[in-house]
Image (tube, rainbow, N blue to C red):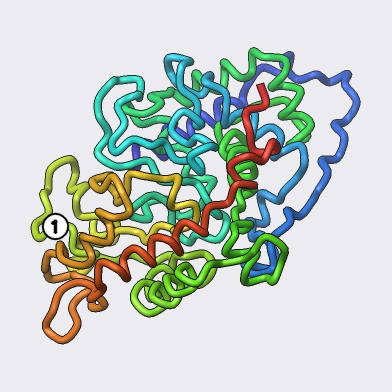
Amino acid sequence: MMHLLRYITIASISMLLLPACNEPDAEAPAPQAKRFSPVVPGNLATAVPYPEHNPFTEEGVTLGRMLFYDPVLSANNELSCASCHQQDKAFSDGEALTSIGVSGKQLKRHAPALINLAWMKGLFWDGGAKDIESLAFGPLTHPDEMGQNLKELVLELQSQEKYRKQFRLAFGTDTITSARVAQALAQFQRTLISANSRYDKYVRGESGGHLAEQELQGMALFKQHCASCHATDFFTDNSYHNNGLDSTYSEDFEALAFGRGRISRQQQDIGKYKTPTLRNIQLTAPYMHDGRFATLEEVLDHYRTGVTWSVSLAPELQQNGNLGIPITQEEKKKIILFLNTLTDEDFVQNKALSNPY
């Protein structure tokens, strides 16, 4: 990790040391980027959080959207962020473990959906990235994902007039750095806000928010059995839990199977993974950190009868000496009916989030 951070720093510093002739001294000062605040539905939050060093601007979000959909970010110029985070699938990819990266090798983890990232306290399945700005460097540089050399990426972007212009509008300078690439991507990804499903309209008392009787029963069952981890209207507690998928955890691939334990180095965290949001869950199959379950039926069958014990197993899944969640087949069907009400068609059809090219 240290060598990667050192490399990123060197790449960033090298851009600052470009010859002065590359600086358009004769140009007028760049116009001030326009600040704005994304609209947030009232049952989700009052505002979108962001770091002081990277506030929302119209130009920054526009640039981030361009970069998100541009395959220039990959080493072979064939993959964009959107290749694995597709809008019609709520910014997931529909694959268990994709192999479309530049190496052609199958990844070891399922690509998570990008939904309401601004409120997440940790990113990736193990929380290995603390904020959205640092999130980008993992997939950008991983040899089995986009495989990009950050210095080469900066030079390639710097060679394109459209990007020099857009970076100037967004950041007041047309000198491009990897840090500014990450900031622009983060601004766009913080606008991936989903909270306009039929469920949301129901809780807000809006038109189109009708829930059928069985869906309401499913909601009650969900609150009883699932909401301790899939909490609030974010449908995640943003924490890490062992949900009984495995009883042993391999140390292969730098102990990737340890989950949160790989990051925290704490024994009690081995086998724990970040609770994913259940928003748009109907669109984001397959499920779990390795995509092992193809359907919601399989997911709930796991919680009914498939939970495996290990030392770090979530206490919510071991009640009264029994493992799992005690629901019937009929209750399972009702919970799934409720989960389907979390699909946000506006989110997956929003033109402001779509490919700008």
Q: Nearer the viewer, residue 334 or 270?
A: 334
Tell me which residue sits at (24%, 39%) in the image. Answer: 108
Q: Is disc 1 surrounded by few (<14), some (14 to 19) or many (20+) residues within 10 Å?
A: some
Report which residue position mark 1 lands on: 246
Q: Give the percent coordinates (x, y) of residue 51.
A: 63, 56
In terms of depth relative to the viewer, which is nearer, 166 or 347? 347
Drawn side of residue 55 relative to residue 117, left or right: right
Q: Which amino acid type is marked by label 1?
A: Asp
Q: Residue at x 87, y 21 (%)?
A: 27
The quadrant holding residue 49 is: bottom right
Q: Quadrant of the N terminus?
A: top left
Q: Is residue 27 left or right of residue 247?
A: right
Q: Quadrant of residue 16?
A: top right
88, 215: nearer the viewer: 215
- Rendered-image quadrant of the C terminus: top right
Residue 144 falls in which quadrant of the image? top left
295 left or right of 25 in image: left
Residue 206, image x and y in percent? 71, 66
